Structure formats: structure tokens, C-alpha cells
Amino acid sequence: MSTFEIQAVPSKRGSDFADLSRIINHAGLLERRTGYYAAKIVLNLLAFAGGWVAFALIGDTWWQLFMAAFFAVMFTQLSFIGHDAGHKQIFRTRRANDAVGHLHAGLTGLSYGWWIGKHTRHHANPNHEDEDPDIDIAVLAFTARQGSAKRGFLRWMAKYQAFLFFPLLLLEGLDLHVSSVQAVRKGEVKSRTLEAGLLIGHFAAYLTAVFLVLSPLTGIVFILVHHALWGLYMGCSFAPGHKGMPTLSAGHELDFLRKQVLTSRNVRGGHAVDFVLGGLNYQIEHHLFPSMPRPSLRRAQVLVREFCEQRGIDYAQCGWPASYGHVLHHLHAVGAPLRATSPNVS
């Protein structure tokens, strides 16, 4: 078995997840936490609205770049709520969760339907090189097979992708907007009219606010800084969960429990890390129980880790800085064969 790939590994404990589910249910960790989310949503919306009031009061000055950083944080925090709504963590009904999800997607200029479809495929097959859209990225290679398939400039990027990883994240915010607009334009979402209206409303309100207050040059720089930092924050929040963990290929026989645990990584830390990463630092527990409310993940982590230790299942967890080290080490290792190739071989 490769360091980075899991081929065909038979499962001998098909009932393990059922056993774990009984433990989690008995602890009441799947019960809705509507009070937590009500407070979280209200505080987020108040902070977001207050930020725009401050933006208007500060006026046309380069000090607004600090507000760009503030909105990068707010866009990410709002996106975390949209993520939780998409997993039915907030309410029991899909309709109520979708209402919250569409609201928060509209505030950040994203297509909720596009993201739901993409993220559902990721959860079904995490780190599967053929079926996980999160490791099907043109400018990066997460497996040797992906690297060998690269050609031209993309092949050069794959060679040095560990050095390019964080700079590329600066473009993630723009990519999210573009992908959302394309999905709605092509009719790839169910609520196309609603989502089109939300996207148009977002971009119209955002651009009007920016250029009503700021001069053209300051406004352009503000938008670039805001979206670059938003993309960086989003990428740094989602990447540690799976990047650098083993990948799956066709024919693997892992059961649900092992498929989710072995391809995921947790990030250790206190409540500050929980806040900054939006609960994504409990990636293992989140993948095992996607509908588990965010505030329950910390308690679930203790139970899941103990369960995995009892069953002899590897449970990956490390500190926050170390998680990025694992990501970069993996990317550098995947690019090694390409760097060893003769320069005149494309």
C-alpha cells in the first residue's frame, strides 16, 4: 500500500459504524442545538451589518483595507453557517435549513445549490481520485496518476505546487464566485431563479456600496484584498481536513467508517480553533455524522477517538501548524516524479 493511496483493503467489521452510532445517539449528540445557532446567526448578522456601517463612516481612505480583512473573516464565518445548514445541522427539516443556507449564500455571493451538489459528492467519496471533486483541481495534483496526466503549464505547476499552494488560495474567493455564476447560468441548480436573483442582488449591492464610498482605485484594491483574504481563509479552513491524507481509488473495499476516518484529519486546539475553523477541525466526526450540530463535535471527538483506538483504526490528529506541514509535504512528494523528469519531456 502506498503512503498516499489506499487500493483494495477489505473490511471485516461491517457493524462498527452501527456500534459507534448507538454510542453517539445515546450521548444525545445528534440533537438539534437551535439556541446555539440562533445566537450565532444573530451575532454574525449584527457584526456583518455593523461592518458595512463602519465602512460607510470611514469613507474613502486606505484604512478601508482593514475593513477588507474584516469582511474576509465575516464572509468565511457566514459560509460556515451555510455549510452547517447544508448538512441539516440547524433544523430538522430540509426546507428550514435551505432557507438559512440560501440567505447566507446570497450574502457571500455563492450558489447554495452548486455548493450542496459538490460537497455531497465529496462526503460520499472523500479523497477518491475519481469521485471527489475536492481533489479534482486543474492546477494541483493530489495523486501520482493526476500528476502524470498534467501537461504544459499545469505540469510545471504540479512540479512546484507545494510552493504555489498558499498563493493559489488567494484566488479561491474569485473561483467560488465564478463557479457559482457558471452553475446558475447553465441551470445546474434546482432553484435557478432564486439563486440567480440572490447572486445578482449580492453583486449589485456589493459593488454599489464599494464604489459609492470609495474612489475607483481604492475600490478595486479593496475588492482584491477582500477576496484574496477570503479565499485564503476559506482554503486554510478546509484544506487540513483531507489534503495529505490517503487517497482512495476504484476497487477499494473500505466500509463507511474506515473510508471516512482514514481519509480525514482533525486539528487539535481549544475553543478559539473551533471558532476560527468553524468546527471543520473535527473533520473525522463531521464526516461520520454530517448532521451533527457544530457545538456537539468537541464532545463527540472524545468518543470517536476512543472507539477507533479500541478497533485499531488509525485516527489522524495534529496541531494546526503541523496540519499545513502535512499538506505541503504531500504536495511536494506528489510533484517529485515530475521534477525528476528530464526538462525536454513534456
Image: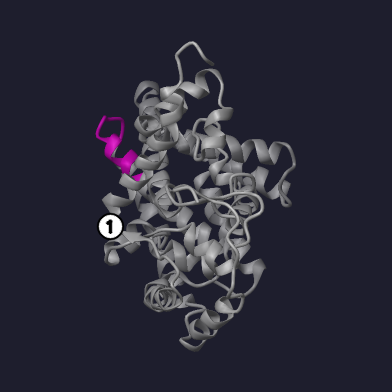
- Horizontal and vertical percent position of residue 193: 72, 46
Q: Position of residue 250 (x, y in %)?
A: 65, 50
Residue at the far front in the pictured view: 1
Overall secondary structure of the magenta section? helix
Residue 98: percent from left, percent from top: 62, 62
Position of residue 170 measured from the top left corner of the image (x, y, whole percent): 40, 34
Element carrying mark 1: loop
Judge whether 111 appears above or below 151 on screen: below
Residue type for callout 1: Gly
284 vs 165: above or below: below
Horizontal arrangement in the rendering, residue 14 relative to residue 156 (left or right) = right
Q: Is residue 199 visible?
A: yes
Which residue ends up furthest to the bottom in the rendered image?
A: 26
Q: Is 74 positioned to the left or the right of 200 in the image?
A: left
To which residue does mark 1 refer?
Answer: 319
Residue at left offset 66%, top offset 53%: 251
189 is within the stretch colored magenta? no
| Frontmost residue, 34 versus 2 | 2
Q: Which residues are magenta?
A: 59-71
